Amino acid sequence: MRGTKIEVGAFWSWAFSDLASNITRSILAEFLVARALGDTRPLRTEWADVDVLTPDGVRVEVKSAAYLQTWRQWKPSAIRFGRFTGRSWDADTGELDEERSVRADVFVFAVQSCQVIADYDRLDVGQWGFYAVPAADVAARGYRSANLAWVRRNAGSAVGYEDLRGAVDRAAALNRESHDGVA
């Protein structure tokens, strides 16, 4: 960093090494989904309308949750997801849309599934379960949040990292069908 002897890696280590913290875990989930789906954009854009863009143009919103938190817990946390709608931001005008909307084609709900602190491995992608839900289902819900039971009813079983692309492709096809009036 200019004017200091500090390297940017020291900042990254200081600020983002705890992959279990809510903010960093959410960004890690976005990164995992982006890599699984082949998003080729070189940087994450915090204010973008969606978190991931597949090579074939499917817009994906990633929501994450975990049973274990960085603070002391008496029992694992209940899994909840929120913020399904948002106001689009126009980078050219610097203005937000007036209305909130669902801006994705598919939602991926990423759950860090470990429930035993001694077994928690921040770097084990096998401890994550992913659920892909068509955005039309999320929009039809009419709420801005949901619990894991709702996600499971709409996505079925969790898939692992290696099967995420197929799950997103299926959810995107269902989303297109619902918009085309086929479903």
Image (cartoon, helix red, strand yellow):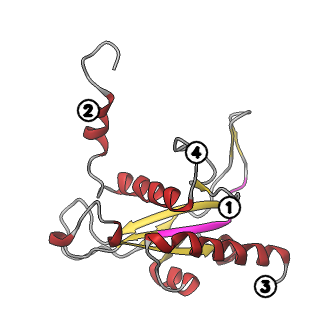
Answer above or below: position of 66 versus 75: above
Separation (CA) of disc 1 from disc 2: 35 Å
Q: Is residue 94 magenta?
A: no
Q: Amino acid at mark 1?
A: Val
Separation (CA) of disc 1 from disc 3: 19 Å
Quarter of the figure with the C terminus: bottom right
* Badge nearest the viewer, 3 or 4: 4
Q: Amino acid at mark 3?
A: Ala
Asked if residue 99 lies left or right of residue 162, the reply is right
Question: Label 3 belongs to which residue?
Answer: 183
Q: Residue at x 31, y 12 (%)?
A: 3
Question: Label 2 belongs to which residue?
Answer: 10
Asked if residue 160 lies left or right of residue 126, the reply is right
Q: Amino acid at mark 2?
A: Ala
Magenta stretch in the rendered image: 99-109
Mark 2 element type: helix
Residue at the extreme left: 118
Within 10 Å of disc 3 (Cα), the crowding (few <14, some 14-19, many 20+) is few
Determine contact: label 4, label 2, CB under 8 Å.
no
Q: Residue at x 68, y 65 (%)?
A: 105
Q: Position of residue 78 (x, y in %)?
A: 35, 76
Asked if residue 30 lies left or right of residue 135, the reply is left
Q: Position of residue 52 (x, y in %)?
A: 58, 55
The answer to which of 30 and 141 lies nearer the viewer is: 30
